[in-house]
Image (cartoon, helix red, strand yellow):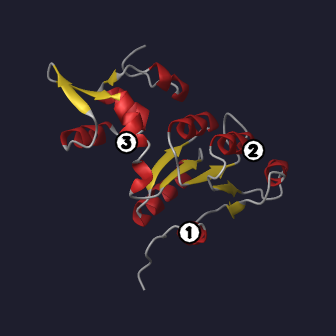
């Protein structure tokens, strides 16, 4: 595999115990400069070998991914719409949430397998796996995890299949900050502070 190839999310189990900064960036889905910054501040479990940083994957899984939500709620956003991803990133940053934003059902399932989340926003129209199937898989892994459905089609068959599992919270597209704010507050999290 060439250095610039990005592995599929399911490949994460095959990553080495001592990961390069680039592999860590792909694993955590954060920009390369952010990984360097966190390593230099001692916030990632890294060692320097031959002048190059290596990050221990087992310690990353145990100490960083599992406890990420300890100080702030961690939210998973599953939507392949780039504009909507930007809205979520801006809102969640302003509200002080940890956030991971992915565009496919496979990535979402991979994230939930590796990490605990406090909240999931799930679009039903995904490019690879149907949203209702992703919903069921997430609930199998973390039954108490609140999943908020994002849809432009509240009367769809997919939405009906999800409702057969019980009541769910839904927000309808197009989404704005005030909708997101009221949703996270209804779920018991502190929302964004809106200037008076």
Drawn side of residue 104 relative to residue 91, left or right: right
The quadrant in which the C terminus is found is bottom left
Where residue 43 appears, as percent x and y from the top left, is 26, 43
Q: Nearer the viewer, mark 2 or mark 3?
A: 3
Q: Are marks 1 and 3 in contact (CB under 8 Å)?
A: no
Drawn side of residue 86 relative to residue 105, left or right: left
Drawn side of residue 82 relative to residue 27, left or right: right
Where residue 188 is drawn, which disc sits there? 1
> In the rendered structure, which disc, 2 or 1, sits on the residue that comes first in sequence?
2
Q: How many marks?
A: 3
Mark 3: which secondary structure? helix
Reading the image, the residue beneath label 3 is 64
Farthest residue in the left direction? 51
Q: Quadrant of residue 49?
A: top left
When the figure is inspected, residue 65 is found, relative to residue 71, above or below; the finding is above
Q: CA distance from mark 1 to mark 3?
A: 24 Å
Q: CA distance from mark 2 to mark 1?
A: 24 Å
The quadrant in which the N terminus is found is top left
When the figure is inspected, residue 74 is found, relative to residue 106, above or below; the finding is below
Reading the image, the residue beneath label 2 is 132
The residue depicted at 52 percent of the width and 29 percent of the height is 9
Where residue 92 is drawn, which disc sits there? none
Where residue 83 appears, as percent x and y from the top left, is 53, 53
Drawn side of residue 133 relative to residue 42, left or right: right
Closest to the observer, 156 or 168? 168
Closest to the observer, 128 or 76? 76
């Amino acid at each position: 595999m060439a250095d610039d190839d990005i592995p599929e999310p399911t490949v994460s189990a095959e990553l080495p115990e001592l990961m390069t900064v680039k592999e860590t960036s792909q694993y955590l889905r954060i920009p390369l400069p952010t990984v360097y910054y966190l390593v230099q501040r001692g916030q990632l479990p890294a060692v320097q070998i031959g002048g190059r940083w290596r990050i221990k994957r087992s310690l990353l899984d145990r100490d960083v991914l599992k406890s990420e939500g300890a100080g702030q709620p961690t939210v998973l956003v599953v939507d392949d719409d780039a504009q909507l991803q930007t809205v979520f990133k801006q809102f969640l940053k302003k509200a002080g949430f940890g956030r991971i934003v992915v565009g496919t059902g496979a990535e979402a399932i991979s994230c939930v397998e590796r990490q605990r989340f406090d909240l999931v926003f799930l679009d039903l129209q995904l490019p690879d796996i149907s949203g209702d199937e992703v919903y069921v898989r997430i609930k199998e892994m973390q039954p108490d995890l609140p999943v908020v459905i994002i849809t432009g089609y509240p009367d769809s068959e997919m939405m009906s299949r999800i409702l057969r599992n019980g009541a769910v919270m839904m927000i309808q597209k197009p989404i704005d900050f005030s909708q997101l704010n009221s949703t996270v507050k209804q779920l018991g999290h502190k929302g964004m502070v809106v200037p008076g």
